[in-house]
Image (spheres, rainbow, N blue to C red):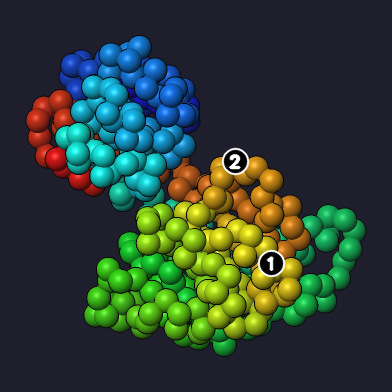
Amino acid sequence: MLVSDGMGMLDGLAAAIEEEAGGDVAVDWQVAQTEDELVAAVAAAGADAVVTGAGTPVTRAVLRDTDVEVVVRAGVGVDNVDLDAAKEYGVAVANAPDYCTREVGEHAVALLLAAARRLHVYDRQTRRGNWAWDEPPAPGRLGAATLGFVGFGSIAQSVADAAVALAGDAVAYDPYVDEATAADYGVALADFEAVCERSDLLVVFAPLTAETRGLVDEAALDRLPDGAVVVNVGRGAVVDDGALAAALDDGSVSAAALDVLPTEPPEDSPLVGREDVLVTPHAGWYSAEARRELVDSVAASVAAVVDGEAVPGWTRVV
């Protein structure tokens, strides 16, 4: 078992894996953040299973050129794993889909309120000695705003009860959710263009897939009401960062709050460092409880593989 991606943040993961698997798994902890590094690390360890975070690409070449049989993604998204290649080469992929639902939901609400009320701008100005309540321009009243969800899965649903109560109306785009489920949360489903046209507050929860990459682009941002607020807690590449920067420049979007970026850590991002953008370092998942639950979930998945049992959170079994 190889644990890659510099995931030393998961204290106790190696011990938990070894305990859950009854000593049948030897854990080799290495940092492997590129395709070539991962291939070399797997070969050096003689590993048949890999635990990885979001930063290491588990590509077709990795799955083709190694003897890996199982990939366990220590997190929710599996966009760094080539699932088609996993199916082709008979590699099982597991994730931890439920461990931080509440944390990301709480983070989304915090970002939404901070951006809508311009708290980050006030804080920066006050730190510079500028005590001015009328800078930036006056925000709109949340109770008169329409809240739009891009993606309405479990995390968005955890947000809906609190956020819908704050906003005047709520709409969502998610082709995989039915109208009855959305209605249970006081949310109306609509197509993507209609959601953009109505959303004074647009919150992105969507995972990164071929369909969602660059979904919130220049055309989508142009459809937003003037002065809209954009929040992203899904995946960075769902939002076109250049288009969002341009919309902020011309004032059609008044503020943004982002927990995710297309490249993490960011390199020459047009959004980091702006007065009108609040950025957090992909921290929405983070809590003491979530850390423990993630370790337990990954260890349980590994033990289940070793024992030939069904694995909670399987993304694909092949």
Give the percent coordinates (x, y) of residue 195: 45, 80
For residue 25, which quarter of the picture? top left
Q: Can you give x and y, in whole percent of width and height, for residue 219 in the image? A: 55, 74
**x 56%, y 42%: residue:** 264
Badge number at residue 254 = none
Relative placement, left or right, of 1 versus 304 is right
Disc nearer the start of the sequence (1/2): 1
Dot 1 alpha-carbon crowd within 10 angstroms: few under 14, some 14 to 19, many 20 or more: some
Residue at x 25%, y 25% (from the top left corner)? 68
Marks counted in the figure total: 2
Residue 129 image point, x, y percent: 90, 58
Q: Position of residue 230 (x, y in %)?
A: 58, 68
Judge the density around disc 2: few (<14), some (14-19), many (≥20) Cα neighbours within 10 Å: few
Secondary structure under tag 2 reads loop
Query: Relative to residue 220, is residue 268 drawn left or right?
Result: right
| Quadrant location, the N terminus | top left
Q: Which mark is residue 246?
A: 1
Residue denoted by label 2? 265
